[in-house]
């Protein structure tokens, strides 16, 4: 335990990043992977990589959302195929198609295409990342989709 005698939260201003848990808007958001860890499912028959994403651009800067990528499953090869395919999308977006560790995906801005879906277990509407794309900015050498690559660009 830690002694908090003398601490009074009322004497401090509210943190500007503390916001309601309203859903993020559908569409593209600039995010970075800020943390990740391998977890076991509640049933114990699967493992997944959970990635914490932080919004780093736009009106929702500082907000967080999480994505899960199924890595093993005792009864559903399809779930693993989908999870690994989605993880491959994130790896390509950060420019590291063969990371040695999930932390290799951290800190690189990407575009996450965010949508909403209803949880089957609670009926609650939640945000879900539908896809990842490389962030196309002048600093990353982005060019409009479908434009030809110049000879000096590799």
Image (tube, grey):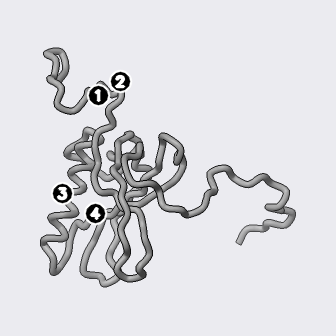
Sooner in the amino-acid sequence: mark 4 or mark 3: 4
- Circle 4 is placed at which residue position? 69
Residue 5: name its quadrant: bottom right
Q: Nearer the viewer, residue 4 or 75?
A: 75
- Circle 2 is placed at which residue position? 138
- Left or right, residue 115 beside residue 77: right
CB contact under 8 Å: marks 4 and 2:
no
Crowding around mark 3 (Cα neighbors within 10 Å: few <14, some 14 to 19, many 20+) is some
Sooner in the amino-acid sequence: mark 3 or mark 1: 3
State which mark lies toward you, 3 or 1: 1
CB contact under 8 Å: marks 2 and 1:
yes
- Left or right, residue 125 beside residue 14: left
Work out how far the residue at label 3 is from the one at label 1, CA to CA, in angstroms.
23 Å
State which mark lies toward you, 4 or 1: 1
- How far across and how far down the image is residue 133, in percent? 28, 43
Work out how far the residue at label 2 is from the one at label 1, CA to CA, in angstroms.
6 Å
Against 66, is 88 above or below? Answer: above
- Circle 3 is placed at which residue position? 85
Secondary structure at badge 3 equals helix
- Circle 1 is placed at which residue position? 142
């Amino acid at each position: 335990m830690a002694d908090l005698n003398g601490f009074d939260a009322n004497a401090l201003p509210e943190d500007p990043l503390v916001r309601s848990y309203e859903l993020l808007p559908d569409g593209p958001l600039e995010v970075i992977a800020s943390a990740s860890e391998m977890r076991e499912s509640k049933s114990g028959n699967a493992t997944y990589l959970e990635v914490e994403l932080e919004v780093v651009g736009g009106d929702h800067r500082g907000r967080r959302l999480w994505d899960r990528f199924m890595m093993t499953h005792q009864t559903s090869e399809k779930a693993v195929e989908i999870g690994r395919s989605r993880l491959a999308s994130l790896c390509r977006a950060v420019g590291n198609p063969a990371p040695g560790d999930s932390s290799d995906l951290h800190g690189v801005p990407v575009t996450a295409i965010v949508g909403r879906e209803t949880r089957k277990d609670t009926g609650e509407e939640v945000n879900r990342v539908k896809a990842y794309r490389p962030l196309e900015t002048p600093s990353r050498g982005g060019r409009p989709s479908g434009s030809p690559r110049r000879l000096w660009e590799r």
